[in-house]
Amino acid sequence: MRKSNLLEKMFRLSSNNTNVRTEFSAGLTIFMTMLYVLIVVPGMLASAGIPKGTATVTVIIMTGVISIIMGIYSNRPFVLAPGLGSVAFLTVTLVVAEDIPWQVGMGMVFISGLLFVLFTVLGLRKLIVRLVPPAIKLSIGAGVGLFIALVGFRNAGLIQASEKANSLQLGDIGSPNTLLALLGFFIMSVLLARKVKGHLLIGIVIVTLVGIPMGVTKLPNAIFSLPESISPAFFQLDIIEALKWSYFPFLLAFFVPDFFSSLGTMLGVASKGNMLDKNGNLKDIDKPFLVDAGGTVLGSLFSVPVMTTYVESAAGVEAGGRTGLTAVSSGFLFLLTLFITPLIMIIPTEATAPALILVGLTMLSSVRNINFEDVTESLPAFMTIVMTIFTFNFGTGIAAGIITYVVVKALSGRHKEVHPGMYILVIPLIAYFISLA
């Protein structure tokens, strides 16, 4: 009873129309949909030269610890992990293409994190959120939803990239993996239609079990394992070398997309849980901003790239999570994997893929509030959504939407509708696109 009272006091469960059981279930749902991070990110970091075992341990620690801090400090159901975009940029662009040591790349991550902290403390991140017009904010949720659905379709094997056609195409729908994912999709869809609580979690468990006789779910050789040493990655960053002026475009490429990716994910997930006010703003947004900024700084010390809120947090919100107890639950589950990694890793991506698809569906409703009769409102919203999907990057989508909004409003004689601060904001966004050219 005392434990329940403590959790009630810490997370204000009653006022958020939730309870301990629902929050734990939501945390478990996010955890299961994000397990792929523990496979994908360490593998990518290993390609850059960081020992895979060490990278796995540092990613687990940072994901667990920063998510717990997020839950306690901000009381929001946001779970954080290394952003795949920043990981790919570090391993592919910097290390492989530019032949820059990963230690220098981590120095750039550290500097980027300090800028995040500075912007947050000075209130600039909150100011930028308030400057972003409602049309863009409303489109962010839909863009995030379609992004999540695209990840789900890809993980399910329902779509795949065609190098020959240079486009997406239908995957091998006759493969056992895809058939299992389709089974999960229909199970979860029916449970959702019947308003069964925990439909995503129930579906993930069923698909995982069905996948055993199908040969998709691989049983582990052991249940327990000891974590490897973090010494090869701890405090290996090179900050001094990262300060070279020639590296400024790379620093900008870390900062701008992750700045807006965090914003986009937080607003998108929050909109799913009806946490935004009538202007599309999230109350006390500086708190989660400060955690992800501080998490990026701390993560760089462990050779973990930019920490960011994951879109899979929306799966927890869909499962009823409304407070930081959801994030705390997920965080502790991630920390437990330090010792039971083989057991946890049996959950196949085919089990979590249909959950992401359905979460994407439920996040599309925000577009109904966009004024499609006014092209100066609908076009920026459209650009935000499609650029998020086509470039597979929230930051790029939001930046494109903001630039479109300012340009179209100004050149159509409606410049007075644009806040003066927006004209300043587009300058670094344009610089960002120029750095990509």
Image (cartoon, rainbow, N blue to C red):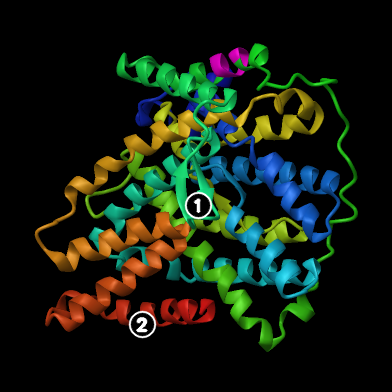
Pointer 2 residue:
424
Residue 329: in sight, yes or no?
A: no
Q: Specify whether 410 is left or right of 288.
A: left
Magenta range is: 205-210
Residue 383 located left or right of residue 97: left
Q: Secondary structure at mark 1?
A: helix
Instruction: Provide the residue designation for mark 1.
Output: 288
* x, y percent for residue 63: 66, 44
Judge the density around disc 2: few (<14), some (14-19), many (≥20) Cα neighbours within 10 Å.
few
Which residue sits at x=27%, y=81%? 420
Q: Residue furthest bottom?
A: 245
In this view, the residue farthest toward the left is 373
Type of residue at label 2?
A: Ile
Comparing 18 with 340, the one in front is 340
> Between tags 1 and 2, which lies in front?
2
Figure quadrant of the N terminus: top right
At x 9% / y 59%, what residue is drawn?
A: 373
The amino acid type found where label 1 is placed reads Pro
